[in-house]
Image: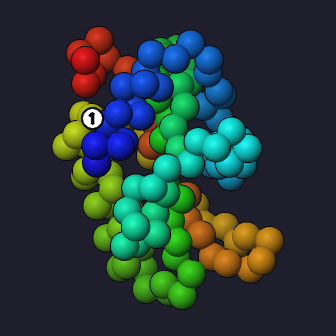
Amino acid sequence: MNQIMKMFIKTKKEKTTIRSDMLSSEIVVKAKKEDKIYVYNETTNTNFCLYRTNYKDEDAIIMVFILDIEGKRKGSYISELTMGIIEDMIRYIGSIDHTYFNRDVTKDGKSIGFLKLIKIIKEDDLI
């Protein structure tokens, strides 16, 4: 959790932004090219990236979590994983202003999930 808080603070100070309506997969491709994919949880093989954005005319942070759901056909596993991430983010960085989840299949046929969270930046967010 320290890494995500550190990256949140760093990203909050950046001036460059991306569009908040970008597809999660587009954001991940961009992050891979820029070497901005970070480990969130090694046990569940979950990674994340984050960028500054503009959402509803406000400065915000967009976070995309990349979930390894290959072979995880049970909806309860995916629900628990996504809800756990959302609960962690609310606990550590405050309210979330937008959430979106979608599944995709990689070029090599691997099933992955994308959890996109957007948080409008507040002055006192993690100082």
Query: Residue 69: image x %, image y %?
Result: 52, 76
Query: Residue 29: image x %, image y %?
Result: 72, 48
Q: Quadrant of residue 111?
A: bottom right
Q: How is the image coloured?
A: rainbow
Residue beneath the point at 24% across and 34% down: 94
Answer yes or no: is residue 90 visible: yes
Residue beneath the point at 35% across and 43% down: 3
User: Does residue 38 appear left or right of residue 121 in this picture?
Assistant: right
Query: As displayed, is residue 46 above or below residue 21?
Result: below
Q: Number of marks in the image?
A: 1
User: Does residue 83 appear left or right of residue 103 in this picture?
Assistant: left
Q: Which residue is mark 1?
A: 93
In the rendered image, which quarter contains the C terminus? top left
Answer yes or no: is residue 23 visible: no
Residue beneath the point at 25% across and 52% down: 87
Q: Quick one: SS at disc 1?
A: helix
Residue beneath the point at 73% across and 70% down: 106
Type of amino acid under label 1:
Ile
Query: As displayed, is residue 112 above or below residue 30?
Result: below
Report the residue that reaches farthest toward the right.
107
Q: Residues within 10 Å of mark 1 (few under 14, many from 20)?
A: some
Q: Nearer the viewer, residue 67 or 41?
A: 41
Query: Residue 20: image x %, image y %?
Result: 60, 31
Q: Nearer the viewer, residue 73 or 11?
A: 11
Query: As displayed, is residue 8 above or below residue 86?
Result: above
Report the residue that reaches farthest toward the left.
91
Query: Residue 15: image x %, image y %?
Result: 56, 13
